[in-house]
């Protein structure tokens, strides 16, 4: 089984990115990426738009002096990679849930009366993004783009590296190259190139938790070079 590697820690000091003419945070450095994550994690609404304006390297491959990533815990906005890449995101906490670039990506909703379905105001979107040489390890719900997703759209994205979750007593573990655990979700023109390992593992989505499989839409999917380290159950969506 794939196990978490030991790294020496290096600190990236967050720097607040500036807003562009569309009101989105323009991100061009690792420091600004960490600053954007800090902004969203401290936000009440968590809808702050983000855009990459350059390829970003957080960690070089096989580096020993490592900067660790704290996932953007919950995200309800739009993140546009603009066909750029982020290289070397590393989060290896074997006790953590919802591990990925984003911990959870979900729609903006309005709660209704008890027993009635939520009203979806706006879906969360992650698009035009490549994640390279990622290393994501957690206890449950681990994905390259997001550990969990509900009411989200992921389009023109890919992940390369390693994504793994551990089995723990009394429960199930869901692992996917793009999304670990999902409800209603749309994935288009996206692919996984990462090594994926877990109890429930899938190339794109490890586990779907919902009433109808038709709520997961996979169109124009590209899933070449899928590898599974360990998996008792491979996900339906790979």
Image (cartoon, rainbow, N blue to C red):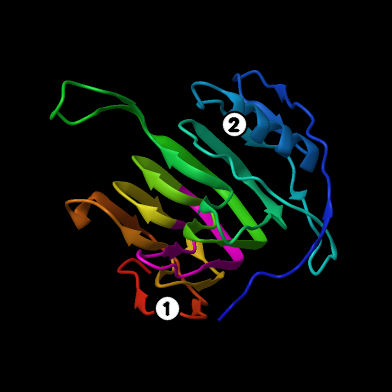
> 71 and 32: which one is in front?
71
Q: In this view, does 84 lie to the left or right of 207?
A: right
Closer to us: 216 or 115: 115
Q: Image check: 143 left or right of 162?
A: left
Q: Position of residue 98 (x, y in %)?
A: 49, 50
- Residue 200: x, y in percent? 38, 70
Magenta-colored span? 155-179
Report how far apart the C-alphas of labels 2 and 1 lie in the structure. Answer: 32 Å
Name which residue lies at 85% across and 65% down.
64
The residue to which callout 2 is attached is 41
Instruction: Please name the residue shown 40% across and 73% down the image.
Output: 199
- Residue 123 x %, y %: 37, 34
The disc, 2 or 1, on the residue closer to the chain's N-terminal end is: 2
Look at mark 1 in the image and give the residue it sits on. 231
Please, what secondary structure does the residue beneath circle 1 have? loop
Q: Are marks 2 and 1 in contact (CB under 8 Å)?
A: no
């Amino acid at each position: 089984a794939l196990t978490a590697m030991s790294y020496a820690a290096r600190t990236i000091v967050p720097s607040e990115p500036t807003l562009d003419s569309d009101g989105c945070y323009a991100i061009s450095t690792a420091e600004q990426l960490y600053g954007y994550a800090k902004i969203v994690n401290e936000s009440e609404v968590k809808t702050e738009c983000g855009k990459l304006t350059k390829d970003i390297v957080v960690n070089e491959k096989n580096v020993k002096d490592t900067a660790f990533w704290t996932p953007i815990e919950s995200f309800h906005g739009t993140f546009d990679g603009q066909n750029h890449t982020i290289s070397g995101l590393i989060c290896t906490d074997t006790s953590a849930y919802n591990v990925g670039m984003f911990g959870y990506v979900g729609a903006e909703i309005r709660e209704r009366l008890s027993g009635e379905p939520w009203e979806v105001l706006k879906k969360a979107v992650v698009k035009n993004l490549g994640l390279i040489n990622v290393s994501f390890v957690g206890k449950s719900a681990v994905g390259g783009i997001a550990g969990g997703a509900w009411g989200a759209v992921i389009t023109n994205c890919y992940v390369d590296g390693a994504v793994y979750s551990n089995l723990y007593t009394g429960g199930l573990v869901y692992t996917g190259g793009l999304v670990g655990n999902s409800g209603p979700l749309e994935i288009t023109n996206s692919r996984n190139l990462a090594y994926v390992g877990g109890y429930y593992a899938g190339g794109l989505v490890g586990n779907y938790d919902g009433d109808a499989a038709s709520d997961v839409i996979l169109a124009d999917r590209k899933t070449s070079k899928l590898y599974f380290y360990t998996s008792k159950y491979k996900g339906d969506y790979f």
